[in-house]
Amino acid sequence: MSAPSSAIQSTLVENRVFPPSEETMQGARISGMPAYEALCAEAAQDFEGYWARLARENLIWDKPFTRTLDESNAPFYRWFDDGELNASANCLDRHIGTPTENKTAIIFEADDGSVTKVTYKELLERVSQFANGLKAHGIVKGDRVLIYMPMTIEGVIAMQACARIGATHSVVFGGFSAKAVHERILDVGAVAVITANYQMRGGKELPLKAIIDDALSGGDCVNVRNVFVFERSKSPCAMVAGRDKTFTEMMAGQSSECAPEIVGAEHPLFILYTSGSTGKPKGVQHSTAGYLMWAKQTMEWSFDIRDTDVFWCTADIGWITGHTYVAYGPLAAGATQIIFEGIPTYPNAGRFWQMIERHKCSVFYTAPTAIRSLIKAAEADAAVHPDRSDLTSLRILGSVGEPINPEAWMWYYKNIGGERCPVVDTFWQTENGGHVITPLPGATPLVPGSCTLPLPGIIAQVVDETGAEMPNGDGGILVIKRPWPSMIRTIWGDPERFKKSYFPEELGGTVYLAGDGAVRSADRGYFRITGRIDDVLNVSGHRMGTMEIESALVAKTDLVAEAAVVGRPDDVTGEAICAFVVLKRSRPTGEEAKQIAKELRDWVAKEIGPIAKPKEIRFGDNLPKTRSGKIMRRLLRSIAKGEKITQDISTLENPAILDQLSESN
Ligand code: WT7
């Protein structure tokens, strides 16, 4: 474990505290701190009883559970494990026969601005028909299905339909390359792929199906029997006879009724790949009951979601945020939500604000990166400033994915929330399933830049390397001492790696290690996340392993001898990827360096995806190494930041290299 990585340096010291207004407290699910504290006390007094109560209240069980938590094989915890249910029934069927059945479930705004709406009843019919189509193609409970879809209603339908028949989905973000998709198809053992012919983003039509064809072209994906293709565009795309079917073909003649497949509470609802500090991406496996319970409960607690709300989470379904707060949570909670296909800057950088006005959005949830880039855009062009839009429908704002710097927090609070709306800075991770540390809009006094306090039942602490709790005010590592229902169950196919990554022996083997540094404030005990303690970068709220990018670079064997990747602070993206490269030929300079850097960037985009492209590439004759040949990354981090080297370099074998790497090529 190394020092916390470089988060954005804040220049604004914001000591103000923003208590909840009377208005937000009024009728809030958790209203006032005593209500929050009462829930924490309930969890402290009867941990299992507390979680059992939530699981009974939030979910509809086909077979009620009698066992709450099984710790006999820790850290492979099992929750509610003799209970049975279906996730899709808990998102859709539960609303049938209630006033919610005719409520709008999804307001879809396409890239070109056209709007489509579906009610809960219509969504259930479409999910059912799709589920029947999957069944007709031999997909059964326990099968894995890879989903590579644009942000559309159909993406959510595909996920819900898998859940309905008990198939485990694995969604891959549409920005990942054919190679990345190929690796995931093999690792997860997918029997089918669900995709679209094209995706529409920023006025452009981008191929998706062609990438799947490429991913499947090696001939080693023998398990994939079918590719189902959503006809997003009228433009043609190649179809492989026997294997590929359009959605229309796949659903032809299928009934719009489909009895949900009842599964055990621990049945894997999905596997979602995320980057770790070493090795290839990890398939994070989530459960059905524990996961879904928390998705719904956090909708109600962190966002205080109400029947009249219009909720909008801007995350893509390819990330965990789009799973929990687009595909599952809002539906389980019976909310109306907005799904947006496009990008925040098309046709102009006022799109988010115009959409909030157009659809009367009341709860808005986005990432600090988006906020920071839209601040820049608004400052540069008054026509896209949020003050041009009527944002008075908003009542709660959320932030997720990376630390939000106090400057961005204040701008969001003032310019978007009109100083009326609480900003909930929700801390969590792919592995957590749902929020773990977050303010509650009707209870928690807010401090800009702090995710404040753990949700009731989440036993978070800041500890040192031996697991001893740090006093408030002192930085340490973030852990969660007790299991919770929506936590990761294992890494697909690699239980040993699961144990090693998240439950290290040094901490006793049963304490969850988040991988972030944190510090609690001296006065309130509020948590502030200081950044990753491993070699994971957070670029625009996307998690990237430095090792993954290094492996991609050295895979360009004709050119690259060695590569080291570090993060450096970036005003907009939080962190930026900086690569130090030693070529097999002499060190290039000037135009030639620029050209090779471009070639390497394109190569990384092909190997992993455009999101992994290094922002900066520096060439050296060598890398700074110790006498035993270990790359000294802390020195590279300083160079990337443009800092003068003040660290001890006595163990450095080749000090002259520092000057060379510090010069720009
Ligand atoms: C990492 C997890 C599930 C959220 C989407 C990203 C960072 C996330 C915050 C926050 C400070 C945050 C952490 C974490 N992170 N939210 N509110 N404040 N840092 O999920 O891709 O699994 O990344 O994102 O470093 O470990 P992810």
Image: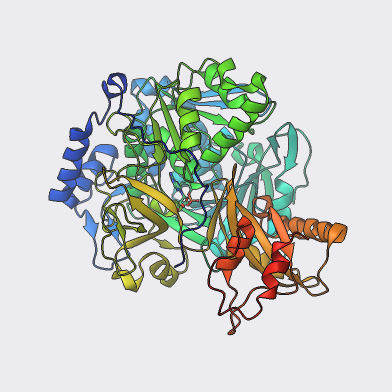
Residue shown at 37%/49% (left/top)?
Answer: 288
Residue shown at 74%/71% (left/top)?
Answer: 582
Residue shown at 55%/34% (left/top)?
Answer: 371
Q: Residue 22 location, x and y as percent?
A: 27, 20
Residue sitting at the far right: 591
Q: Residue 41 location, x and y as percent?
A: 15, 44
Residue 161 shown left or right of residue 433 in the figure: right
Residue 324 shown left or right of residue 594 in the figure: left
Q: Quadrant of the C terminus?
A: bottom right
Residue sitting at the far left: 45
Is residue 496 something one can see in this rendering? yes
Q: For this rendering, which residue is in front, 186 or 306?
A: 306
Q: Quadrant of the N terminus?
A: bottom left
Q: Residue 357 location, x and y as percent?
A: 53, 17
**Is 362 situated above or below 373?**
above
**Is 153 situated above or below 282?**
above
Q: Residue 351 location, x and y as percent?
A: 62, 25
Q: For this rendering, which residue is in front, 344 or 584?
A: 584
Q: Quadrant of residue 307?
A: top left
**Is 43 situated above or below 471?**
above
Q: For this rendering, which residue is in front, 130 or 428?
A: 428
Is residue 181 something one can see in this rendering? no
